[in-house]
Amino acid sequence: MKWFLRLPSWVRLSSALTLAAAMFVLIWWMNQKRQAAEDVWHPKARHWTSTPLTVSWDEHFWGAHNNSFSKAVSEINGAVGCNQLRVALDGGPTDVRIVSTDGEPCGDMEALVSKESHAAQTYLCPDGTAEIHIGQPGDVTKSYLIAIHELGHVLGLGHDPYIASGANAPMSVSMMVPNVADYSGRLGTGRRLPAASDKDRRELAKRYCK
Ligand SMILES: [Zn+2]
C-alpha cells in the first residue's frame, strides 16, 4: 500500500471515489437483477426439474374449450422458445390436470398457488403433479385466457399488476394479470390477445429451456 500513499492526495481521493462508485453500481445492478427474478416467480412456485410437463383434461366435459386449452399450451411454448408443456396422450401420464371446480382438490390450501376472482384455482399436489380447477367459462376466449394464466402459475409465474378496465384497457397486457379473463370482452378493438411478458419469457427460458 506504500506506493498508494505516495500518490498525490487528489489521485488517492479520486481513485477511492471511483472505487466506491463502481461498488455502488455493482450492488445496485445485482439488486435489480434479484428483484427482476422475484417479480416473476410466485412465492410458492415449484421448480420443475423435468419438462415438458404433460397437460390433460376431459375432452367430453370441456367440449368447445378443448381448442382453447391446446392453444394455451402451444402459445406458452412458442413465446418461450422451447417446449415447457405438452398435451398428454390419451390415458398417458399427466403432470397437470385441468378439472372442474366441483371436484375435490388434490392438495390443501397451503399448496394452492392461485385463487382467482373468476373462480379458477391452481393446486400443487403432494404427489408432484398439479391441478387447475375452473368452472365452465362462458366463451372460448375466456377459457383460453384462464388456461394460459393458470398454466403460467403451474410453471411458477406470479401475478403482474391489474389491468385498467373499460376503454382505458391497454392494447396488450400480460397473461399474468389477475383479472386477465375480463380482457376477453375487450378484444376486437385492435387489442392483442394477452401473452407472456418479455420478463416472464426470459425467466421461463432461463429456468426451463436447457
Ligand atoms: Zn392468478
Image (cartoon, rainbow, N blue to C red):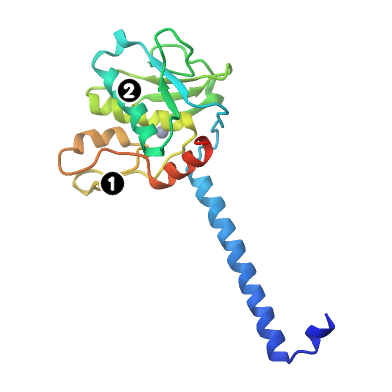
Is residue 203 in view from this perspective? Answer: yes
Assign a secondary structure to mark 1.
loop
Image position, residue 57 (x, y; %): 37, 14
Which residue corresponds to the image point at 52% horizontal and 46% vertical from the top-left?
37
Quick check: 118 left or right of 25? left
Q: Position of residue 147 (x, y in %)?
A: 35, 26
Q: Quadrant of residue 165?
A: top left
Find out if the beta carbon at label 2 lies less than 8 Å from the nearest ligand 1 atom. Answer: no
Q: Secondary structure at mark 2?
A: helix
Front in this rendered view, residue 171 or 15: 15
Instruction: Say which residue label 2 marks.
Output: 70
Which residue is at 39% across, 9% downward?
Answer: 90
Spatial distance from mark 2 to mark 1, Cα to Cα?
28 Å
Q: Quadrant of the N terminus?
A: bottom right
Q: Which residue is mark 1?
A: 164
What amino acid is at disc 1? Ala
Viewer can see residue 98: no
Q: How far across and down, in percent of the image, does residue 118 sit?
A: 33, 28
Where in the figure is residue 78, as x and y percent of width and height?
A: 36, 35
Q: Residues at badges 2 and 1 in contact (C-beta under 8 Å)?
A: no
Question: Residue at point 73% right, 91% down?
Answer: 9
What residue appears at the point 66 percent right and 74 percent down from the top-left corner?
19
- Label 1: how many residues lie within 10 Å, few (<14), some (14-19) or many (20+)? few
Q: Specify few, some or many for label 2: CA neighbours under 10 Å numbering under 14, 14-19, or 20 or more.
A: some
Considering only vertical position in the picture, is 39 above or below 52? Answer: below
Three-letter code, disc 2: Ser
